[in-house]
Image (cartoon, rainbow, N blue to C red):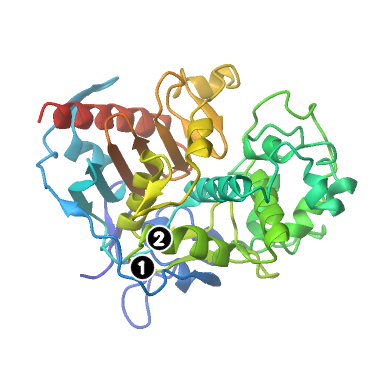
């Protein structure tokens, strides 16, 4: 089946079809609509990547107990809709539901297939979070230690005085603007430093050539460390550099040996890499729908999966202990009782549900109480869409209710 993509109106666009293709993805806008309908499944054709090897052992085999979930209905702020309608309207590329460890629903859209690698965006942050937990469980990492204990070069930056835990929780006081639509913001510079984008044409200023260069350039502190939550993607990369420094290995090798092979992944994954060979921890990870589900099931099972304790149980338990007062009013609009801890989003501080979330609609939802995992891979037209997220939560809760009732 050829890859076909649609624009915001649903019109089919033959992106990168034909030889040579007539409708080529523009280099600077590959991650924007409508181009992301194709590019999120074809990162290795756009950017340099590093392999995350799955190993040689047989993959973990899911049991299948398929259920018809498409017609489950639920209420939203704009009326009643079905799961099928939600998946169609929210630019879904892949959707999978696990219940009691078995696949009960698995659907692909927009040309995606079971072997397609899909960009995770900030879902990737949670992999670095659990990798930190593995290192902490072995005594190789002290989350309470200063970042400069591991990366002394950062003493000349605003990270001076911040702990690893501050970075894990996005609670350092380092000034970093996460304005996605501004190419000159800090996250816009991350796009250039990571190799995702080219420097804006005609701009004569010096831009960071690698992620490490950008981190070294963060010298402004805007709040006391630990005083408030402020989502800053580059915090994940600081943690990843700490783990690389401790181990002497690069991130793709660490994720392969410590997580991916132990999950019994079906396919090798990959990271995008910058000019220095650094894998983008904050959003450059790509994997298949089922392999994201394996990761989610491991989280739901307190770090245990495929016959081994991959992540310390205590780390997962601690990750679920969010502080309900860290979110500002804007964040509470979509997560009124939510929190953030150890690179995971907490749906409700009164439940053990953990979420991995990425812009443009990437999502892993892990609920241990209901032995339930949902994975949604998307290519939304916009970076953020609270409506799609809130409707998705309603859909997931409706699916859970149906499965509980048998």
Assess whether mark 1 and mark 2 are in contact (beta carbons under 8 angstroms).
yes
Which quarter of the figure has residue 40?
bottom left
Residue 399 in sight: yes
- Residue at screen point 30% across, 40% down: 373
Element at label 2: strand
| Residue of label 2 | 287
331 left or right, relative to 373: right
Residue 142, compared with residue 327, is above or below; it is: below
Q: Earlier in the sequence, mark 2 or mark 1?
A: 1
Front residue of 364 and 200 = 364
| Residue of label 1 | 267
Alpha-carbon span between mark 2 and mark 1: 7 Å
Q: Dot 1: few (<14), some (14–19), or many (≥20) neighbours within 10 Å? A: many
Provide residue 235's location: percent of width, then percent of height.
67, 44
226 left or right, relative to 236: right
- Residue at screen point 36% across, 41% down: 301
Provide residue 104's location: percent of width, then percent of height.
17, 45
Q: Which mark is residue 120?
A: none
Residue 8 in sight: no
Quadrant holding the N terminus? bottom left
- Residue at screen point 73% across, 27% down: 226
Element at label 1: loop
Front residue of 136 and 26 = 136
């Amino acid at each position: 089946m050829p890859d076909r993509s649609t624009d915001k109106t649903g019109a089919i666009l033959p992106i990168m079809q034909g030889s040579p293709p007539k409708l080529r993805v523009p280099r600077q806008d590959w991650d924007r609509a409508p181009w992301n309908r194709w590019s999120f499944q074809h990162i290795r054709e756009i950017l340099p990547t590093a392999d995350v090897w799955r190993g040689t052992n047989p993959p973990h085999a899911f049991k299948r107990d398929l259920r018809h979930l498409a017609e489950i209905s639920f209420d939203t702020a704009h009326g009643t809709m079905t799961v099928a309608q939600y998946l169609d309207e929210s630019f879904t590329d892949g959707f999978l539901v696990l219940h009691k460890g078995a696949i009960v629903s698995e659907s692909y859209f927009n040309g995606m297939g079971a072997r397609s690698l899909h960009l995770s965006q900030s879902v990737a942050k949670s992999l670095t979070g659990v990798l930190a937990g593995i290192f902490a469980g072995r005594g190789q990492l002290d989350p309470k230690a200063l970042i400069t204990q591991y990366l002394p070069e950062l003493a000349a930056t605003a990270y001076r005085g911040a702990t690893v835990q501050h970075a894990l929780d996005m609670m350092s006081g380092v000034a970093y603007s996460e304005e996605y639509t501004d190419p000159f913001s800090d996250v816009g510079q991350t796009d250039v430093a990571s190799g995702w984008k080219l420097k804006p044409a005609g701009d004569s200023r010096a831009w960071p050539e690698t992620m490490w260069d950008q981190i070294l350039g963060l010298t402004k502190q805007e709040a006391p460390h630990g005083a408030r939550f402020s989502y800053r993607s580059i915090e994940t990369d600081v943690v990843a550099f700490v783990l690389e420094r401790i181990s002497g290995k690069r991130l793709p090798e660490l994720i392969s040996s410590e997580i991916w092979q132990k999950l019994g992944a079906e396919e090798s994954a990959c990271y995008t890499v910058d000019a220095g060979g650094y894998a983008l921890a904050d959003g450059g990870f790509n994997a298949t729908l089922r392999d994201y589900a394996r990761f989610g099931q491991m989280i739901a099972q307190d770090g245990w999966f495929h016959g081994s304790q991959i992540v310390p149980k205590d780390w997962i338990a601690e990750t679920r202990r969010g502080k309900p007062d860290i979110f500002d009013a804007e964040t509470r609009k979509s997560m009124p009782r939510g929190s953030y801890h150890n690179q995971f989003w907490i749906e409700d501080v009164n439940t053990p549900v953990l979420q991995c979330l990425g812009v443009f609609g990437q999502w892993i939802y892990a609920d241990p109480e209901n032995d339930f995992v949902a994975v949604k891979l998307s290519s939304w037209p916009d970076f953020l869409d609270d409506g799609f997220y809130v409707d998705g939560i309603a859909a997931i809760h409706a699916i859970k209710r149906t499965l509980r009732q048998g």
